[in-house]
Amino acid sequence: MISCRDAMDIIRKTAEGRRPETILCPVTGIPGYVAAEDVAAPLSIQPFDNSAMDGFAVIRADLESANENSPAALQVAATVAAGDSADGITVARGSCARIMTGAPVPAGADAVVPVEMAEMQDGTALFKTCPRPFDHIRRAGEDFKKGDAVLVKGQMLGEAHILPLATLGIAEVSVYRKPRAAFLATGKELVDDLAKPLSGGEIYNSNGPYGKAVLERLGAEVVAAETVPDDAEAFADTLQKLAGENLDLIVSSGAVSAGAFDFVRRVLEKNGAEILYHKIAMKPGKPNLFARLPNGTLYFGLPGNPVATAVGLRFFVDAALRAMTGRAAEKPVPAVAETPFSKKPGLQMFLKADARIGEEGRLAVRFSAGQMSFMVHPFLTANCWAVAPEAASEIRAGETVEIYPFFPHSGIV
């Protein structure tokens, strides 16, 4: 067995050598992709001084003495609407310009007075107060200045990035192609039709739909999701069929331990795969396997228990996808344990847990009941994974532990 840390090192070093090519993606389609280059603001936003209110563009010096008893009267010399150009319009002393929200502020004006704070009388606007400098004016470059960093190479993109990119007039972004993946669930006991009543010895195939969904959430394009019976020949045929799909990685669940029907390693080696590790000092999921196929496709063989599969996807497959697309390794978040946990030393454990903001504003975590690798009911309430170190025999209440969001990029609380 190797340690989790050594396994992660092997994964990252191997996956970094399989960097997908870059493509240009329309800004509306970027969620789930990774930026392949830095992006700088091509212009300033706001691109020009503009009004934040419907009102009047004024020169403050004209209103310094204005009050309730002695309002200042200014001639309305022009009207500027959103979308108009203010070129050639200048606000001179003793005059003002009627202006709409978003319209460019004419030269000479240094504040906008909201329409409800002025009164119109026969082409003249009356003001009873003096605004502050640049009141209700959105200054040019106040949001972005030309050249400001917008995206960083290796950044996972989401819906939130669309608004600033579109605001800056960026129509497309260079991104890494999503790694192409396949998920294989193994086992003759698996029933794919979740609406079909179970017969003796059967279980529903939960790893199949879960694996496909999580791979997509992690940033992969799933081009195949299949169920393979406990048969070495059928598994070999499936690998042969997938060889023509130009896959970056294949993930399977089950058949990686040492039982009579655990055929994954044997078939991989027979087909020329390089086994990079097999068995990690961890729980759940000790029989983890990582290999490289002759065509360069990466292969993750995860144990079939559903939580072991979930942990393998969350930490090891995610680490590979991060390395492929130039993203930094994920870092844990410290939290204070509110409940104790005991374990045998020698295996690092990934614990289903629930984090919250505790006393004094610190992040606190409780370990879920039901830590066995077949128990999935904690998935309904857990929001993070807590790590119990390999050498530890217990975690005491009040100790600091490392936690990770249940899914990457989802946050913890």
Image (cartoon, grey):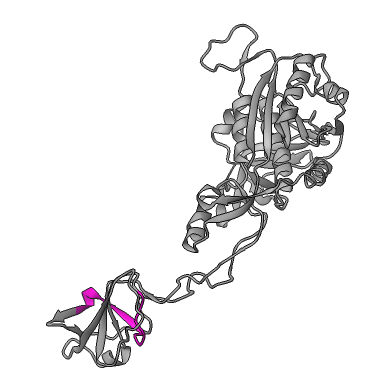
In the rendered image, residue 37, in percent from the top left (x then y), is placed at: 66, 58
Q: Position of residue 54 (x, y in %)?
A: 27, 72
Q: Is residue 153 left or right of residue 79?
A: right
Q: How many marks?
A: 0
Span of residues in magenta: 104-118
Q: Quadrant of the N terminus?
A: top right
Point out the residue furthest to the front here.
88
Q: Residue pushed farthest left?
A: 122
Q: Is residue 405 left or right of residue 329?
A: left
**Residue drawn at the location 87% of the way across and 22% of the way down:** 270
Q: Quadrant of residue 284?
A: top right
Where is residue 341? Give x, y as percent: 70, 37
Relative side of 231 to 189, left or right: right
- Position of residue 166 relative to residue 281, above or below, is below
Q: Is residue 372 visible?
A: no
Residue in front for this viewpoint, 342 or 281:
281
Q: Residue at x 23, y 90 (%)?
A: 66
Name the residue at the top extreme. Answer: 200
* Looking at the image, residue 411 lies above or below residue 118: above
Check if residue 135 falls in the magenta segment: no
Percent x, y for residue 97? 26, 81
Figure check: 18 above or below 299: below
Q: Is residue 228 visible?
A: yes
Q: Which residue is at 65% across, 28% downward?
A: 224
Q: Quadrant of residue 251?
A: top right
